[in-house]
Amino acid sequence: MKKRILIFVLIVCTLFVAACSSGYGKYENKISELRSYVYEGACENFTVTAVSGEREQPFEIDGQASKRVDFAVITVKPKVFDISASYDYKITYDGNEYTGNLVRHPFNETYSVEIGVKITDDFVVSINGDECEISMTSVKKDGFISANKAFDIALDRLKSTIKQLEKYEIYIRFTKNPVNEEDGYFWYVAFVDGENTYAVLINPETAEIVACKEKE
């Protein structure tokens, strides 16, 4: 009898934990972008950042999610900008190499490339052959909350708003504070109905919501 009671208690506890930490799993078909990986690196002449994950293809902010594909965007910022300069790149990741020419941004003093790969671990970027070889390392620290946890926090805070939306797509991004990049990285979770965006910005160390936009 005691054994049956113990088994019953364990089952209830397991179900309770699963219910309290469900994450974004059952919302997979509504997620347009899941950007969980961010890397940084630098050498004497360049600073490099990279973001990676999955996002819908084609990418449209319309309140509906499409099938997602893997992606990584590598952005290179020369420490001395020359509008006439051009740069080639080599990305070495997981035993594979990706090469080509960087594209200059029309407004910012940066160059970038996008490849169809999800980068989930440290990697190497080489610029102009042997001119610069940069080890790219994750900006995440031990103890940071996961994308699933960030989603649960956002879902709980915005649940009354979400109930009022006829349709929506979801963006989950590990990103710098859009208001002040000097503040570091945060989890950004947004529900977009095609016209309006309702979102929270979450401190990854404390799990605290530092900014929120919800439906009035």
Image (cartoon, rainbow, N blue to C red):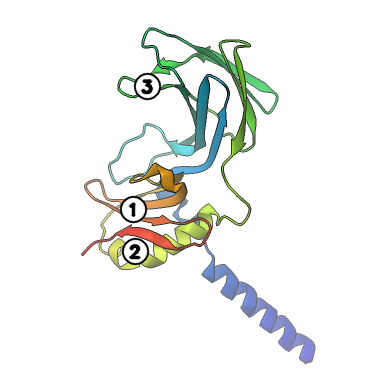
Q: Are marks 1 and 3 in contact (CB under 8 Å)?
A: no
Q: Is residue 71 visible?
A: no
User: In what element is the residue under mark 2?
Assistant: loop
Cβ atoms under marks 1 and 2 closer than 8 Å:
yes
Between 49 and 149, the one nearer to me in the picture:
49
**Image-quadrant location for residue 8:** bottom right
Q: Position of 86 compared to 215: left or right? A: right
Q: List the residue tagged with mark 1.
A: 191
User: Can residue 127 be seen in this snapshot?
Assistant: yes
List x then y, in percent, for residue 28: 47, 50
Q: Residues within 10 Å of mark 3 (few under 14, many from 20)?
A: some
- Is disc 3 placed on a helix, strand or loop? loop
> Which residue is the site of mark 2?
158
The three-letter code of the residue at mark 2 reads: Leu
- Residue at left offset 47%, top offset 44%: 34
- Calculate the distance from the C-alpha at mark 1 to the C-alpha at mark 2: 9 Å
Instruction: Tell me the CA gap for discs 1 and 3.
Output: 31 Å
- Hey, what amino acid is under mark 3? Glu
The quadrant the N terminus occupies is bottom right
Indicate which disc, 1 or 3, sits on the residue closer to the N terminus: 3
Which tag, 3 or 2, sits closer to the chain's start?
3
Image coordinates for residue 136, horizontal then vertical, percent:
60, 31
